[in-house]
Structure formats: structure tokens, C-alpha cells
Image (spheres, rainbow, N blue to C red):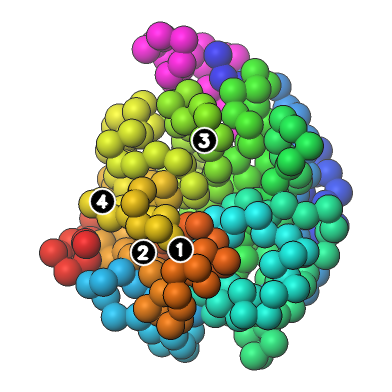
Amino acid sequence: MLLLAVSGGGIGGYFKSDLPILGPLVHSILGGSSGTADVGSIVDQVIRGGSASGQQAQPGPSTANASIPAQLASSRRPSDRILIATFNIQVFGESKLAKREVMRVITEVVRQFDVVAIQEIRAQSDDVMPELVKAINADGSRYSYLVGERLGRTVSTEQYAFVYDTTRIEHEPNAFGTMADKNDLLHREPFVARLRARTQSPQNAFTFWLVNTHTDPDEVPEEVAALAEVFQVMQAARPEEDDVILLGDLNASESELGPLGQLPGMDWVVRGATTNTRQTKAYDNILFRREATGEYTGRWGVMNLEPTFGLTRDEALSVSDHLPVWAEFSAWETAQPGALAERSNDSRR
């Protein structure tokens, strides 16, 4: 049985021992069990910290798929909507920080979105994320970040991060951190954070969990199945919070989501599109329960770095072998699920 708890992280990464346990486990997907877990079983609390920056970071250019014109100006983001993106920045570390043109593209990508979930940060130094947000904010933007611990079963460990525009998004200080996988079913446990759209009426603003994940390419079916339980655990984390958005590099297409895709009401944004730079595979996606997350507007995109930034294929690959994927949500909590969903042929590619 999969037992997961989330740790708290504070400024500088100190531990928050008072963060609520994420449990009990709602449903057992693995091991052939289809019954509900014992509601009296409490998840063991394992505290593992993430850290929040004490500085503000900057967003990069957001863009869309072929059906939605690219916009390379963050000021064009609608005030009543937020753009959430996921981006696996392949082997992001000191080497890429030193490449001026690569960093130009990465910072411009981030500036187009309100929140970007980043995967595959591989660096020995703790300066990588501060340097990234410093570069993003060089144009006067006001981004900040949350970063998780180094994860992995080998010496090649990775970190997750959330980079967000502080003028449009705020995070709950004691509600972010790395989930704990007691039975070691995942190579890299998800990094989670509870966020809220920054509005003039906070009590009516859209609040949500983001669950940042990167599955191991050699164990995709097993790890995607484990993510089904991750999603359910996050659903039970807060009685008042029904919006859980799982996003990242799943190494799985929409037809390979297994138990995760079979959860009641589960939906995902990428359909019939490729998300790798070579445009041969669909690895990255954004998932949520449509009944709960009626804030989704139906607009989504895959940012093709080549036409957006005038790059050759090799230049795009020097940035990453993955493309950014994004989806649009209302900045306000939606009273009637699905009321804002405006799916049209134009929003899918």
C-alpha cells in the first residue's frame, strides 16, 4: 500500500513539524486492490522540507499551440485568468545558466505564465534557482519561487520548483513541500504547493494544489499508477480544497495514463499533440478533476520554441528536449463546475 505524507518547508528550507498529515489514504490502486483503505489508518508523518525564496523572481513569455497566437508579452495576460504551465528544462543547472541564448529563451518562457512547474533541475549548487529568478526579474518582473529537495535513487538527483508571478499568485506559507513515499514506489516524490490567485477579493479567489511530478522513464506504468494515489491523497489533504492540479513530465501519452486517467472525473489538457521538442512524443500534461476544477477555461497550449523564438531545431534542443505546456484557469472560484469551460476546436490541436 502506498503511504504518502507531505512535508512542510519554510524560508531557507527549515522543517515545519506542524504541517497536517495528508491522509488517510483514500483508495488503493496498486497491488490489485480496488477497495477503499481503512479510514482509521493515519499516514505516517515524515517531514521533508522545501524552500521558498526570499526574493522575487520574474516570468517569461507565454505562448500557445498552433491554434492560439503566441504572445510574447506578460502584460497581455488577462486579469481575470491565470496561466499555469509545466516545463521540463532538461538537465537544468550551472551549464545552462552560463549559456546566454539558452537563458534568454528560458526566462522569456517563464515570463509568459503566472506559475511554472519546473522539472529536472540538476545542480550541485543551491544558486541555480536564485540565479534563474534574478535573470527573469531583470526586466522589472516580480517572480519568486519554491524549490524542493534533491531526489532520486542514484547520484544523479533532481529538484522540482514552482516559479510564480508574485503580483498575480501567492502561496500558503506552511502548505508546500515534498511528499513522502514510504514504500519507495516513485523515484522522485512529487513536490506540492497550495497557491491562490492574487485578487482584490481573496475570499473569492481561485485556490488550488499544484502537484509537480517527473516519472522515471524505465518505470512509467508503475509510477503513473502510483500517481493515482498521489492525486487522491492530495484530494483528502484539505477538506476545504477540492482543486488538485497534477502536472509535469509523466513520460506517458494520454492513452498511457492507466489508473491515473481512470480516476472518476479525471481530465487532462493535452490531447492529440506532441510535447517533446522533436515533436514525436507526448510526455507532458496537466490533469485535474473536471467536476471539481470548473475554473479551467478549456484553453491550453504547447509552446513550440522554434517558431516562437526563431530557433533552429538544434537551438531549441539546447534549451530542452521538452516543450512548455500550459492551461488557462479563472482567477476566481467557480460556483458551478464547468461554467467557464469553453472547449472549442480552436483550443485543441
Q: Position of residue 142 (x, y in %)?
A: 65, 81
Circle 2: element type: strand
Q: Position of residue 235 (x, y in %)?
A: 47, 37
Q: Amino acid at mark 4?
A: Arg
Residue 271 numbered mark, or none: 4
Q: Residues within 10 Å of mark 2 (few under 14, many from 20)?
A: many
Say which quadrant the N terminus sits in.
Answer: top right
Query: N-terminal of the two: label 2 or label 3?
Result: 3
Query: N-terminal of the two: label 4 or label 3?
Result: 3
Decide if residue 287 is on the left or right side of residue 262. Answer: right
Q: Position of residue 125 (x, y in %)?
A: 85, 58
Q: Residue at x 57, y 66 (%)?
A: 318
Residue 324 numbered mark, or none: 1
Q: Which residues are magenta?
A: 18-41
**On screen, residue 182 above or below 61:** above
Q: Nearer the viewer, residue 340 or 345?
A: 345
> Extreme left residue here?
345
Q: CA distance from mark 4 to mark 3?
A: 20 Å
Q: Nearer the viewer, residue 331 or 86?
A: 86
Residue marked by disc 3: 217
Q: Nearer the viewer, residue 195 or 334?
A: 195
Decide if residue 345 is on the left or right side of residue 127. Answer: left
Q: Main secondary structure of the magenta part?
A: loop
Decide if residue 45 is on the left or right side of residue 170. Answer: right
